[in-house]
Amino acid sequence: MNGNVHNDGAAKPVAYILLGPPGSGKSTQADLFGREFGAVHVDMGAALRAAAGEATPFGEALSEIINTRRELVPDGIVRAILENELRRIGPSRPVVIDGAPRRESQIPSVMSAIVGSGRELRKAILIDLSEEDAVERISRRYSCGVCGRKLILGADLPTRGSACPSCGSPVSQRADDTEEGVRKRYRIFRDETMPVIDDFEKNGILLRVPGDRSAEEIFGMIASAVRRK
Ligand SMILES: [Zn+2]
């Protein structure tokens, strides 16, 4: 930035990146963040799962990677899907990206998609959570297949067989939300995503918040740090 605010109007719209292991509540925080700061939630996990649900050779190959092998998708696919999402949102709105970059080699792709969309990366926010806390949280996580409501066993759902309290439809868990699936995703996070976090930390843009709190407490910490900037 050259400090000449009279030149071409407002400052560049900003992007935030949300990072955290499975179960750290990234989507919830992204939704809260979007409401508070007017940012659009770019949910890369959902975008990739949607692409993996398409009955095309590409969709089937992606489903094999995500749902069967439970591996990270190739960097080129992440970049194409992120660019597509940012194009769909348009250039003027701030965004909060959840689910990328997941490994160090994805940083240039993600940065170039952000910069290419006319935005500036303001902060990378890490929601920290231990593996045992991740397993415990995810084993209680359900969603409604009809209205999409997110439900926590013991809080929103009395038993595993309960129907959606909002619309009465059956609820289900994500295909990769088994204990084995969570532990594998956590291992990938530790091995592949920790270097991403180190990189953002070295660049001075990392904000680290503890994930073993309520969603409201976590968001309070994020919001006050973002407002200070
Ligand atoms: Zn429902």
Image: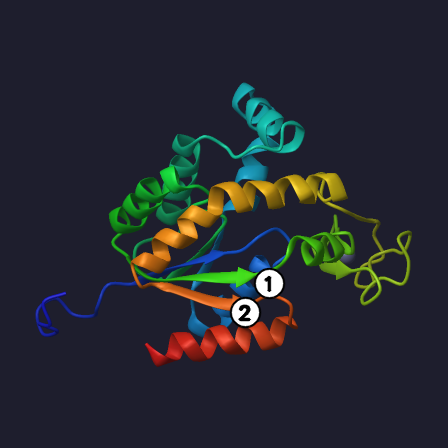
The amino acid type of the residue labelled 1 equals Thr
Q: Considering depth in this image, is 75 or 36 the residue closer to the camera?
A: 75
Locate the C terminus and report the quarter of the image it occupies.
bottom left
**Residue 61 as seen in the image, left or right of residue 178:** left
Mark 1 and mark 2: Cα distance apart in space: 6 Å
- Could you tell me how many numbered marks the image carries? 2
Residue under pointer 2? 32
Indicate whether 28 appears above or below 74: below
Residue at the outermost top position: 57
Q: Do the numbered discs 1 and 2 sit on residues whose CB atoms are within 8 Å? A: yes
Q: Residue at x 75, y 60 (%)?
A: 151
Residue 103 image offset from top left, x and y in percent: 44, 41
Which residue lies at the image location 36% right of the left edge and 80% below the top edge? 228
Say whether residue 35 is left or right of residue 177: left
**What is the crowding at mark 1: few (fewer than 14 residues within 10 Å), some, or many (at least 20)?**
some
Name the image quarter holding residue 153. Answer: bottom right
Disc assigned to residue 40: none
Q: How is the image coloured?
A: rainbow
Q: Residue at x 53, y 78 (%)?
A: 220
Crowd band around label 2 with a 10 angstrom C-alpha radius: few (<14), some (14–19), many (20+): some
- Residue 28: which numbered mark, if any? 1
Asked whether 120 or 199 is in front, the reply is 199
Residue 224 in sight here: yes
Give the residue displayed 30% in from the left and 55% down from the top: 91
Residue 205 place in picture, x, y as percent:
33, 63
Please say if 98 is above or below 227. Answer: above
- Could you tell me the amino acid type at mark 2? Leu
The quadrant of the rendering that contains the N terminus is bottom left
Seen in the picture, residue 222 relative to 62 is either above or below; the reply is: below
